[in-house]
Amino acid sequence: MIDRTHRLSITRQAEALGISRGAVYYVPRAASARDLVLMRRMDAVHLEMPWFGARGLRRVLKAEFPGVGRRHYATLMRTMGISAVAPQPGTSTRHRAHPVYPYLLRHRTVTRPNEVWAMDITYIPMARGFVSLAAVMDWATRRVLAWRVSITLDSAFCIAAVEEALATYGRPEIFNTDQGAQFTSAAFTGLLLDHGIRLSMDGKGCWRDNVFVERLWRSLKYEEVYLHGYDTVSAATAGIGRYFTLYNARRPHSSLAAQTPDEAYFPRSSLAAAA
């Protein structure tokens, strides 16, 4: 939008667009090596004790990272896209352009594949930097249906994962997410509504409303991500892909009567009929 060769000064162009002049001149800086190590530890602690905010994380990690203040923890939490699972100020305020839908799964027993799908985003640390991961999971069988890795937190990679899942597996009756901006955007909700899918959204700060995806993140990080210091985005993508293949096809779940997600999602009776 800013044309540096235009005869109109950059200051006047910024004023005309209603943006700060500083935003035009600002050059993003990569996270320092110390911050990357700190974010890796913050992510691990957040998985163990998700109720801690910036103050709590500072208390837990004070011995490992002396001199790091609460405000810096808060800044890194915003960068990572994580927050304490507790009611926040102004939780009843809704953006008019982003309607929030009610949670539909309370007291509901989900037993069939494609009855409910769930989706969430998580932070994936690398040796240098980090990426975001979005995944679509079948609620009843815990099967990962589609996923995408992205270096940004816009809604495009979430939409791409949903489109792949819909094209490959049909459509669910209900699709559950949290109230993140990616999931309340018109493009994301419009895609689901166009397919006749009912939308369900977690309560603010209620991580238990989407607990199966949260458990998936824990398994992924402790069984794959934390064991490999990915050097590149392509290495992270390949490693996550290998893990999800193993998770779906070879990792039995006690909640599924020792079946794998693939076995639960594709019952033997249907496979025999198809054969």
Image (tube, rainbow, N blue to C red):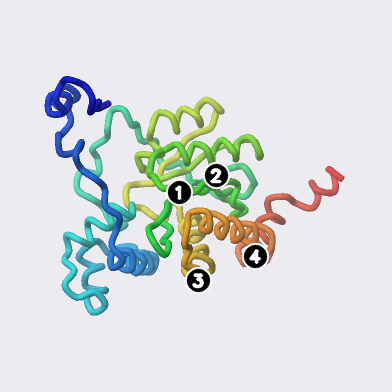
Task: Identify residue for label 2.
Answer: 117
How far is the residue under mark 4 from the one under mark 1? 21 Å
Q: Amino acid at mark 3?
A: Leu
Q: Alpha-carbon distance for marks 2 and 3?
A: 29 Å
Residue at position x 60%, y 36% in the image: 166
Q: Say whether disc 3 or disc 4 marks the residue closer to the N-terminus.
A: 3
Question: Does any portion of residue 109 appear in the rendered image?
Answer: yes
**Badge 4 is on which residue?**
251
| Of pointers 1 and 3, the one earlier in the residue sequence | 1
Q: Does residue 49 appear in this view? A: no
Tag 3 or tag 2, which sits nearer the N-term? 2
User: Residue flagged by tag 1: what amino acid is it?
Assistant: Asp
Task: Residue at 52% x, 46% y: name it.
Answer: 148
Distance in Å between CA atoms under marks 1 and 3: 22 Å
Residue on which the image places disc 3: 227
- Tag 4: amino acid: Arg
**Structural distance between the alpha carbons of marks 1 and 2:** 11 Å
Query: Which one is nearer the viewer's eye here, 267 or 238?
Result: 238
Q: Amino acid at mark 2?
A: Trp
Q: Which residue is mark 1?
A: 120
Q: Is residue 142 above or below residue 9?
A: below
The quadrant in which residue 70 appears is bottom left
Q: Please identify, in this view, whether the residue under mark 2 or under mark 3 is nearer the observer.
A: 3
Q: Residue at x 66, y 65 (%)?
A: 252
Q: Secondary structure at mark 1?
A: strand
